Image (tube, helix red, strand yellow):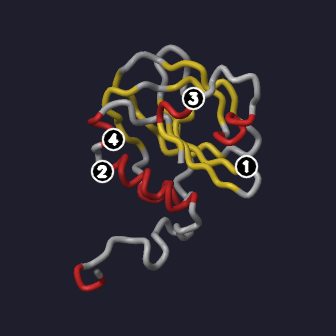
């Protein structure tokens, strides 16, 4: 699971291995501002609970220079200067699964239920614990008091 600024870790590395794990290449972002996020793949299990459009709080829309071959875009942010940009995706690298989002610069975003639900489903998907309907596998969903 890679969130926000982890996308820019190793951005100046001489090898592409980190970018291949991520599934995207990004080297900069637009200025901090609110923007709309469009769900591009509503049938994907991660996106089943994500709205068709969601207005993110002031955030940084990362400019994606390259999508690697195994990357599947799930949502895009509506760009201001550099066009629309993929901001939620999944990728495979060898036997590994990567869920990534460039969203999450500010507290308002990371505290929102939409973001927290998205990251939860992304984590469960990456661990093979999310079913095709976007529901956690048994034992990985919310626990009731009786189950604790």
The structure residue drawn at horizontal position 47% and vertical position 40%, both measured from the top left corner, is 38
Relative horizontal placement of residue 55, taking residue 80 as reference (left or right)? left
| Mark 1: secondary structure | strand
Whether pointer 2 and pointer 4 mark residues with C-beta atoms closer than 8 Å, the reply is no
Q: Earlier in the sequence, mark 3 or mark 2?
A: 3
Sequence order check, earlier mark of 1 and 3: 3
Separation of residues labelled 1 and 3 (CA atoms): 17 Å
Say which of marks 3 and 2 sits in front: 3
Q: Is tag 1's residue or tag 4's residue first in the polypeptide sequence?
A: 1
Residue closer to the observer: 14 or 132 = 14
Q: Earlier in the sequence, mark 3 or mark 4?
A: 3
Q: Element under label 3?
A: loop
Instruction: Identify the element where label 4 is drawn.
Output: helix
Report helix, strand or loop for mark 2. helix
108 in relation to 136, above or below = above
Q: In the rendered image of this protein, does residue 83 appear above or below residue 6?
A: above
* Mark seen at residue 9: 3
**Residue appearing at x 55%, y 43% in the figure:** 100
Label 1 to label 2: alpha-carbon separation: 29 Å
- Disc 4: which residue: 110
Residue 83 falls in which quadrant of the image? top right
- For mark 2, what is the residue? 113
Which of discs 1 and 2 lies nearer the camera? The answer is: 1
The label on residue 112 is: none
Residue 87 x/y as whole percent: 52, 36
Q: Is residue 96 left or right of residue 42?
A: right
Q: Which residue is mark 1?
A: 93
- Choose mark 1 or mark 3, whichever is in front: 3
């Amino acid at each position: 699971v890679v969130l926000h600024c982890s996308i820019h870790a190793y951005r100046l590395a001489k090898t592409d291995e980190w970018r291949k794990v991520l599934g995207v290449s990004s080297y900069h972002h637009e200025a901090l501002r609110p923007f709309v996020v469009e769900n591009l793949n509503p049938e994907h299990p991660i996106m089943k609970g994500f709205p068709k459009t969601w207005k993110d709080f002031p955030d940084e829309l990362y400019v994606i220079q390259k999508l690697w071959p195994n990357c599947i875009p799930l949502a895009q942010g509506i760009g201001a200067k550099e066009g629309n940009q993929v901001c939620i995706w999944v990728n495979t690298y060898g036997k590994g699964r990567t869920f990534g989002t460039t969203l999450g610069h500010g507290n308002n975003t990371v505290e929102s239920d939409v973001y927290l639900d998205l990251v939860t489903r992304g984590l469960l998907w990456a661990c093979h614990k999310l079913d095709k309907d976007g529901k956690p596998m048994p034992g990985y969903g919310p626990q009731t008091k009786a189950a604790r």
